[in-house]
Structure formats: structure tokens, C-alpha cells
Amino acid sequence: MTATPMPAPMEDQIAQWRQFLRRRRAIDSGDIEELEDHLRSQVTMLSDAGLAGDEAFLVAVKRMGSLDELSREFAREHSDRLWKQLVIGDGYSATAQATLRSDAFVALGLAVAAALSMKAPALFGHQFDEQATFYPRNVSLLILPHLAGYFAWKRGLGVMRTLLLVLPFAVGALFANIYPFSGPRSNTAMLTALHLPIALWLVVGVSYAAGLWFRGNVRMDFVRFSGELFIYYVLLALGGGVFIMFTVLMFNAIGINAERFVGEWLLPCGIAGAVLVASWLVEAKQSVIENMAPVLTRVFTPFFTVLLLAFLATMAWTGNPIDVQRNVLIAFDLLLVLVVGLVLYAASARDLNAPPNLFDRLQVLLIVSALLVDTLALVAIAARISEFGFTPNRVAALGENIILFVNLAWSAVVYARFLTGSASFAVLERWQTAYLPIYSAWATFVVIAFPPLFSFI
Amino acid sequence: MDLGKDLVAASATPLVLAILAEGESYGYAILKRVAELSGGHLQWTDGMLYPVLHRLERQRLVAAKWGTAENGRRRRYYRITKGGRAELAAQRRQWQVVDETLRVIWMKAQLA
């Protein structure tokens, strides 16, 4: 026997009522079904007793109790539902469950594949804990293709486009390995190791965007993904650290040294596999759990603003110049990276149409003070750059500093225009997302051009 | 007659268990049975029955499963468990104590 529907207007009313219930987090889909069954029974009974359709519906809804009270009672019984859980089960349709499951399957398979690729160089005599720069230079090439492949599969990218994605990885592998770097302490080899992941991250972004890379909002999604991935990765790494500690301790207790196993297998395989697992988690939970990166941004933006202002005030008050040491430029690069990150992730969580608020003013203050601090540092460094000489590290750091400075300077201008009401926030978002390829372009330049320019030192 | 909120809450467990002890049932029918038994004096807000049923299910006093109603829709049926019967017996004794005590004191009040 099939369900006998009520008259159409009644069905509409019931559907609307169901919508209201669905917004209550404490009431899940099974409860809604149960309550709806009750409502329908009640309406039928009242109609049979002679009430008109509308009246019967109103009386039945009233007898059900107010939504607030109902939701409170359900919340008392099911307080766990107020915590969003990542579970593959209740509340998903059968097809959604099948997608989630095949997703998990592919992600785990690729995680294993990435872990095995990390060990593949062992066949050619490279060990993960060796002194040479082989692993640092190649680690992104061993992991990121799997991640790009995951998105290519997930977004149904097609064979041609997927093959196109292989090209940049092949080029990366070429330039990471053809140069005759001068031994394990080669500066340019380390620059390659640091910059190749940044260059290739763009390729992951392109596969993530699946042909929509030129849309600002899709790029912003990739920015959000990257931020969440970073947070998940750090959490997994912490867990992995605990796991490794127990592995070593427990085998130590029975007189077996597990450190070799940890260094040659557990660590490299874990580093690679965790990237895929974390990516899968970010994708699976994106609609379930609040994004963490914007929350951290909100928490730390005021602190960093105060830090920078206090730094500037102290410099002005004491007259102490910046003590220019060899690596000071890198420290200020990192500061700018951090500020760009704060701007980017604040923008990623912002409602584009909301009017300027206090937090926006704070952001402008943060950007301007960061630019001031960086200018002071650059002036101090410029005075002594001839003394230090142009080493590859210093030139790379300087290039990055300029790129970040330009980003922030224009962000400050756009932000100021937004605050005065002469531009919308979307302009800032567009600027930030349009800027993303520049980081990768510079990183690519460093990987390809720096080693020969500085004769592989 | 409207019963106080606390009394409604306190009597919900034994009432639901007792009705389910008569046989498997579902939310709407349970409420109808309550109204019938009390001659319409005991009125619950309908929705509030379900959190009670879910609590009893969590306490394993009742068991629930999805079935199909006579109109073809999915419906959740509840039946009492062994633990539920034991709880019902215990509750019954407790209510009897309360009932007898009140009876005695009210009898005296009447006599005075």
C-alpha cells in the first residue's frame, strides 16, 4: 500500500512545518519523520471529526507544542546533537552515503600510494633520514601528485585534463634533480626544497578548481581548503608524534630499538599519508564543522596588531634600531606572510555585502603597522646589504618581501577605500585571489633560475 | 483539569511503560490511549511524548524499530523490554506508596 497524500494545500503546509523543524539542530531527520507521522494522524483524526482542513492542521500543530519548547526537550535528551559530528550514517541519503564511502576509499587508497611513493626512492638507494638534499627537494613531488589526482578523480576531471596536470609535476621533477647542486649544504638546493611545494601548490589548486580556476570564489574556496588542511595536518602531526613516541617507548621496553623503523618507514609514510587523509577530512567535513582558520584569524588579529604597534612605539621611544643580523630578512618575510594570512582568512569568512565594522578597522591598522615595521627593516637591511653580499637566500628573501609588501600595500589602499565606502569588499577579495598565482610564479622562478644564477652553491 | 508540569513529567514514564506493556504501539496511539484512559483529563503537549520515548529507549526500557503504517508511511513502533517491565513494576510500587499515604492523610482530613 502506498502513502495516501493529503490535499495539495495541506501537503504544502506540512512541508513548510517540516522545514521549520529541520532548522532545529536537536531534532534529526528520523525525529521529523516520526513527528510528521504524528501530525498527519492527528490531522486525519480531526478531519474525520468534522474539522475543515485548515482548522485541523492548526489544531494539530498547536497540540504538538511550540517549536522552541519541543526543540528544548529534544536537546535535553539528545545534547550530543548540538555538537556537530562527522559521521557517515544517519541523516544522509543512501546515494550521499555511497559517495562518502567511495570518497573515503579513494582517499585512503591514495594515502597508501603516497606513503609508498615516499619509499620508492629507497629502491635507488635514497633513505629518508640521509644527509643529502634528495628528500627535501623531492618530497612535494612524491606527495602532491596524489593530492592533485584525488581532486581530479573527485571532480571528474577527465583524462586529458588530468594528463595536463602531470606536466607541471614532470617539469618540477626535472628542475629539482638535473642541477649539479654542490653537496648537502647547498643553499640553492634548499631554496628549491622550500619553493617547489609553493610552486606546485598552484597545480593542486587548479585540480581542486576543476576548470574554474579563473573564478575568484573558487580560488577563495581553495584558500579555505588550504587553511583547514593546514590545521588538520598539524592536528594529525601531533597525534602522529604521540604514536611515534609510544612506538619507540614500547619496543624499547622489550629491548628492541624501533628508531630505525620510525625514521625510515613510519615518519616518511606518515608525512605523506597524512596529507591525503587531512585533505579528505577537510572535504568531508566542510559543511559539518565550522571552519577553524577564520576563527583563529579573529582571535589573533587583535594580538598581532597590538604586538606590531607596541613594537613601533618601543622603537620610537627608545630609538633602538633593528639589529640587522644575517637572517633578519627571513624573519620579516615570515611576519608579512603571517599578516597576509590573517588578511586572507579574515576575507575568506567575510560576508561580502556586510558594511565595514570594527574588525575591518583593526585589519587596516594591522596591515599599515606591518608595512611600517617592514619598511624600517628594509631600510636597515639596505644600508648593509653590500656588506653581506647578495647570497641566493638573501635575494630570494628580498624578492618575497617585495611580493608580500606589494600585496599588503594595495590591500591597505583597497581596505581604506572600503572603509570610506568608495569600494566594496569584493574588490579586496578579488585582489587577494588574483594575487595567488604570483606566489607560485616567484617560487617557480626561484626553483628554475636561482641554481644556475648562483652557480649551484 | 490541568495537571501540574512536574506531575505530568513524573507520571509520563509509568504511563508510557504501562501502555506499552499492553502491546507494541506508536506515538500517536500512545497519546490517544492516555486520553482515553484519563477520560481526557490528562493532556500532554503531543510533541513532548517523543523525547520521553527516546529517553526510555536510551535507558533500554523500550525498544524501537521503524515499520510501515496502514497508510503506507514509515512509522516508529515501540515495545517494552524486560528491563522496562521490571522498571514498571518498581514504579508501580512507588506510586502505590504515594497513593496510599495520600489516601490515609486525606481520609483523616475528611474525618476532622
Image (cartoon, rainbow, N blue to C red):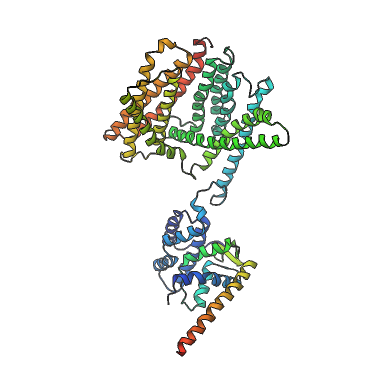
Q: Name the side, left or right, on which A410 lies relative to A290.
A: left
Quadrant containing the N terminus of chain A in the rendered view: bottom right
| Residue A21 falls in image quadrant | bottom left
Foreground: A426 or A140? Answer: A140
* Name of the residue lying farthest toward the right: A255
Q: Name the side, left or right, on which A235 lies relative to A337.
A: right
Instruction: Name the residue rendered at 73%, 36% in the picture.
Output: A254
Q: Name the side, left or right, on which A47 lies relative to A139.
A: left
Foreground: A254 or B62? Answer: A254
Q: Name the side, left or right, on which A413 lies relative to A237.
A: left
| Residue A2 falls in image quadrant | bottom right
Foreground: B98 or A9? Answer: B98
The answer to whether A25 is drawn above or below residue A37 in the figure is above
Q: Is residue B72 visible?
A: no
* Name of the residue lying farthest toward the front: A318
Q: Is residue A196 visible?
A: yes
Residue B68 location, x and y as percent? 58, 63
Instruction: Name the residue rendered at 51%, 62% in the picture.
Output: B51
Residue A29 location, x and y as percent? 51, 55
Residue A178 location, x and y as percent? 58, 14
Instruction: Name the residue rendered at 50%, 77% in the picture.
Output: B38
